[in-house]
Amino acid sequence: MIRNVLSYKGNGAYCYANSASMLLSSASIEIPPAMLEVLSGVGLGAFLSDDGMFMLSNLEATPETGISKSLEILGISCFTPQDGNMASDPIQQMRDMLKESPVMVGPLDMGYLENNPAHIYARGFDHFVLAYDIGEKEILFHDPDGFPCASLSLDAFYNAWKSEGIKWPHTPFNFWTCPERNSNPSQEEIHKKALSYFRSIYSSSEDASRHLGWKINGEAIDTVVRDLSDGKITKKGLGRMENFIFEVGSRRALDYADFFSRNGDYELSEIKSKQASILGKCHSLAVKGDWKMVCGRLQELSHLEEDFKSSLMK
């Protein structure tokens, strides 16, 4: 019997999806963050870089490109620098834009976001916020990491927005503003476009993997299991799994499961539900420091990832 997915609602590292949802709400376009997260394609697959960075994501959809793709699928356009709309003075451009609309900003280097007490430990991590006002010396924004009505000096904001410490490919001083609905696609159209996009993600990631020499999907997870067993994962790598990868991975998998279930893709939904459960257990085990048991769960995850890919692509 097919059962409905029990959705999760609560805190979580959905910074770009939450920020995008707030931006759209300012234009009376109501899209749940979970839908934006799923349609971004971020969180599908897995990769292990040549310098040991492990992520439950792919080599095609970054948060920056993913959120723009999700808006495209939903029939929504925004004014962005990705279309050549980059000014020589980004702070002045921000002043001008905020006269018309709130501005979703990112990626920002979290190490400069002094409104967050943990910012000193987050240099090089990416983040997204929604700016809504600016003064002579500071900017005001909603930070979806739990800080509404936050403020930051313009100097700190500029350095965060410059994003020099962020390693993945991105656009410095990136933003989205002035959202407009160009079309109102049906759920069937959204589903069809999403599946096509998801398939392209896996295909493009395979091409990128061959070019970079990085491991992806089940092979990446299997390699991490071996490295965990051999004690080769750095303290930083363990901390990233314990404090980010497993928990956000579990939530993403649940949201994908819900999306597929609502659209009748029950096999894909069931696989994603199982992945969510495994990743939730991995998080609990990692917090306890039981990395041996984490390895066993990750082996299950590896098989499910390959099952998901096969089911999606057929």
Image (tube, rainbow, N blue to C red):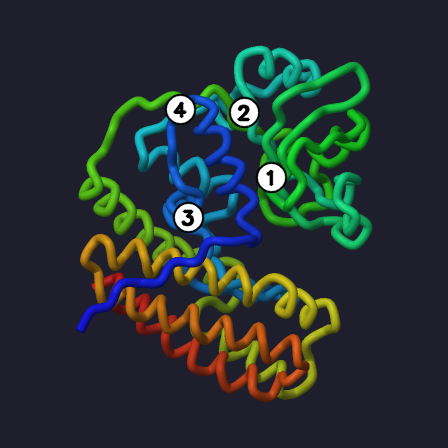
Determine the CA span between mark 4 and mark 1: 21 Å
What residue is drawn where x is 20% and y is 36%? Answer: 186
Tell me which numbered mark, 2 or 3, is placed earlier along the sequence.
3
- Badge 1 crowding class, 10 Å Cα cut-off, few under 14, some 14 to 19, many 20 or more, is many
Determine the CA span between mark 3 and mark 4: 18 Å
Residue closer to the observer: 12 or 38: 12
Label 2, on which residue?
81
CB within 8 Å, label 2 to label 4: no
Tell me which numbered mark, 3 or 1, is placed earlier along the sequence.
3
Determine the CA span between mark 3 and mark 1: 16 Å
Is 313 placed above or below 293 here?
Answer: above
CB within 8 Å, label 3 to label 4: no
Tell me which numbered mark, 3 or 4, is placed earlier along the sequence.
4
Residue closer to the observer: 51 or 18: 18
Determine the CA span between mark 2 and mark 3: 25 Å
Give the image location of residue 263, x and y in percent.
21, 53
- Badge 2 crowding class, 10 Å Cα cut-off, few under 14, some 14 to 19, many 20 or more, is some
Quadrant position of residue 107: top right
Question: What is the quadrant of the N terminus in the image?
Answer: bottom left
Give the image location of residue 219, x and y in percent.
46, 75
Q: Which mark is residue 128?
A: 1
Give the image location of residue 67, x and y in percent.
45, 39
As shown in the figure, which amino acid type bears the numbered disc 1? Answer: Phe
Label 4, on which residue?
28
